[in-house]
Image (cartoon, rainbow, N blue to C red):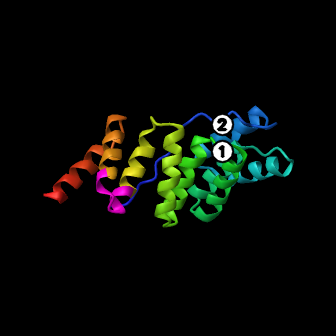
């Protein structure tokens, strides 16, 4: 069983450090419409003009990650975290990038940090639970998947059922 990537829709970080609201809205709209190749030059232009912010780096990481450049995406999420160490979405996306790069123990750490910042996001609990089960930390993994199910993750209950069947 592998993790499936789903878009996490959250409000952007409040740290936009001089980034024009219209610019950021345009970039986020392009990302939502999966127009990554159009968003990246806009992001790079803003960063190049010294308007970098945690949210711009997160947006760049999203564009690169959804374009399958997970290593570059990881670097962007790390930059976002360097600018705002409490930026939940950057930690979550770092976990996704690390997972896709096969760095599972580091991904677990990133998801745990994201969860410590925002405990009610079902995607974090689901991804964390799935990785913990994969790393044979079954009790912790089931706990996270149960949390994901309580928080409304659409696949958590099925994952729990598969685990229970495998235990029989």
- The local crowd at label 1, few if under 14, some if 14 to 19, many if 20 or more residues have their Cα within 10 Å, is some
User: Which is the main secondary structure of the residues drawn in magenta?
Assistant: helix
Q: Is residue 99 left or right of residue 74?
A: left
Q: Secondary structure at mark 2?
A: loop
The residue drawn where x is 44% and y is 34% is 120
Residue closest to the far right: 49
Query: Quadrant of the rendered structure where residue 1 is?
Result: bottom left
Question: Residue 66 appears at what percent x and percent y?
Answer: 56, 55
Question: Residue 95 appears at what percent x and percent y?
Answer: 52, 54
- Whether the magenta-drawn stretch holds residue 122 is answered as no
The residue drawn where x is 75% and y is 32% is 21
Q: Secondary structure at mark 1?
A: loop
How far apart are labels 2 and 1 at the CA level? 11 Å
- Whether the magenta-drawn stretch holds residue 137 is answered as yes
- Can see residue 20? yes
Q: Is residue 3 left or right of residue 67?
A: left
- Can see residue 8? no
Q: Is residue 16 left or right of residue 100?
A: right
**Do tag 2 and tag 1 residues touch (Cβ < 8 Å)?**
no
Query: Quadrant of the rendered structure where residue 94 is?
Result: bottom right
Query: Quadrant of the rendered structure where residue 18 is?
Result: top right
33, above or below 120, in the image: below
- The local crowd at label 2, few if under 14, some if 14 to 19, many if 20 or more residues have their Cα within 10 Å, is some
Question: Residue 26 appears at what percent x and percent y?
Answer: 70, 39
Question: Residue 22 appears at what percent x and percent y?
Answer: 75, 33
Earlier sequence position, callout 2 versus callout 1: 2
Residue bearing the label numbered 2:
13
Residue bearing the label numbered 1:
85
Magenta range: 132-139
């Amino acid at each position: 069983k592998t993790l499936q990537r789903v878009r996490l829709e959250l409000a952007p970080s409040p740290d936009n450090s001089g980034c024009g609201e219209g610019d950021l809205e345009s970039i986020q709209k392009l990302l939502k419409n999966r127009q990554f190749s159009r968003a990246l030059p806009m992001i790079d232009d803003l960063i190049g003009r010294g308007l970098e912010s945690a949210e711009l780096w997160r947006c760049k990481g999203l564009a690169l990650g959804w374009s399958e450049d997970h290593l570059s995406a990881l670097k962007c999420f790390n930059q976002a975290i360097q600018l705002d160490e409490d930026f939940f979405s950057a930690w979550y996306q770092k976990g996704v990038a690390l997972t896709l790069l096969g760095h599972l123990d580091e991904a677990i750490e990133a998801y745990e940090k994201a969860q410590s910042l925002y405990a009610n996001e079902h995607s974090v609990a689901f991804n964390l639970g799935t990785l913990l089960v994969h790393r044979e930390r079954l009790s912790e993994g089931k706990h996270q998947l149960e949390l994901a199910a309580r928080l409304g993750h659409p696949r958590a209950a099925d994952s729990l059922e598969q685990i229970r069947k495998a235990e029989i």
